Image: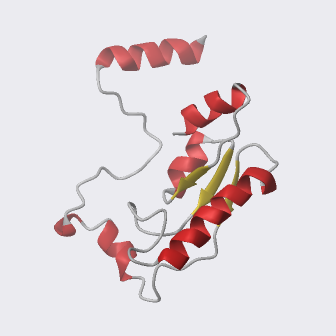
Amino acid sequence: MCLIARHLEDAGIPTVCLASALDIMQAGQAPRTVFVDYPLGHTTGRPSDPDNQKQIVRSALDALVSITTPGQIDTLPLVWSTDHTWRAEAVDPSKGDVRQPRDLTPRYQHEADRVLAEENASS
């Protein structure tokens, strides 16, 4: 998403990324990002809560004008719930989350991808 946003911005098309994975957006450095501290899959708001959804979408659209520093990430002051157990459940493998832990180690689908990435990094 970040690479696409940067490509579109280079072509003169303003973008804003709406995300709930802060570390990924920090690493990807999209031109403009609005971060929502909600569970993955709920970036545009709580189910069956149109007011919350409208607030998030309006904030993202406003960011097209208000974010003037490339790479800036604005955090919306919204709370998914007062009970923060969703955070622990989101990364609990017994609850169905089988993703690898996030870190800064590059991962490649094929060995050739790793070789190409290393060659490009050294040039």
Q: Image height check: is 64 above or below 113? A: below
25 or 113: which is nearer to us? 25
Q: Position of residue 49 (x, y in %)?
A: 45, 78
9 or 40: which is nearer to us? 9
What residue sits 71% from the left and 45% below the top? 71
* Left or right: 114 in relation to 70: left
44 or 110: which is nearer to us? 44
Q: Position of residue 88 (x, y in %)?
A: 35, 74
> Which color scheme did the rendering employ for the protein?
secondary structure
Q: Image height check: is 5 above or below 39? A: above
What residue sits 56% from the left and 18% below the top? 121
Q: Residue furthest toward the bottom? A: 82
**How many numbered marks have been drawn onto this rendered protein structure?**
0
Image quarter hosting the C terminus: top right
What residue sits 64% from the left and 52% below the top? 33
* Left or right: 13 in relation to 89: right
Q: Position of residue 2 (x, y in %)?
A: 56, 39
Q: Image height check: is 102 above or below 97? A: above
Q: Image height check: is 69 above or below 8? A: below
* Left or right: 58 in relation to 69: left
What residue sits 71% from the left and 26% below the top? 10
